[in-house]
Amino acid sequence: MTTVTPPPPGTTFSEEQKEYLAGIMAGIAQRRAFPYVGILPDSGLLTENPAHGGPNLAAPATPPEETIHGTPISEVTKQELWTKDLHGLDAWD
């Protein structure tokens, strides 16, 4: 098990460290890869080990289904889809 020690009070990243971390994160964003971050179930601590931590909390969430006035697209009627795609009066040729 990994032991996490808190940083000494009053310490911050140096400019060199900040630049290095910014470069790492820019590279990750460019590759569209997401680092693994999970929570250990027994202690609640963060972990980088996918075998112990469950789902990846750093991965982007799936976007919610599109809705029409709060109703999911999969549940609307054909007529409601017409008014979404066309002007309401144009649907009745």
Image: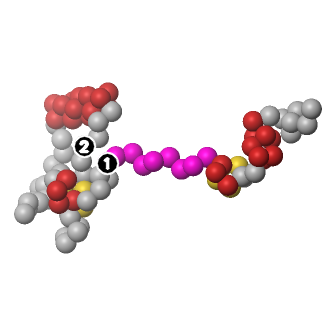
Q: Find residue 20 and report its horizontal and vertical position in percent.
A: 18, 31
Foreground pick, 23 / 80: 80
Classify residue 14 by image quadrant.
top left
Give the number of callouts. Answer: 2
> From which residue to which does the magenta span run?
58-66
Residue 15 coordinates in the image, percent (x, y):
19, 32
Q: Quadrant of the C terminus?
A: top right
Residue at point 17%, 60% (across, down): 52
The answer to whether any part of residue 15 appears in the image is no
> Mark 2 is on which residue type?
Pro
Residue identifier under label 1? 58
Query: What residue sits right under mark 2 in the picture?
Result: 35
Relative to residue 26, is residue 72 drawn left or right? right
Foreground pick, 52 / 2 = 52
Residue drawn at 75 percent across, 51 percent down: 77
Q: Position of residue 28 (x, y in %)?
A: 27, 33
Give the residue drawn at x 19%, y 53%: 50
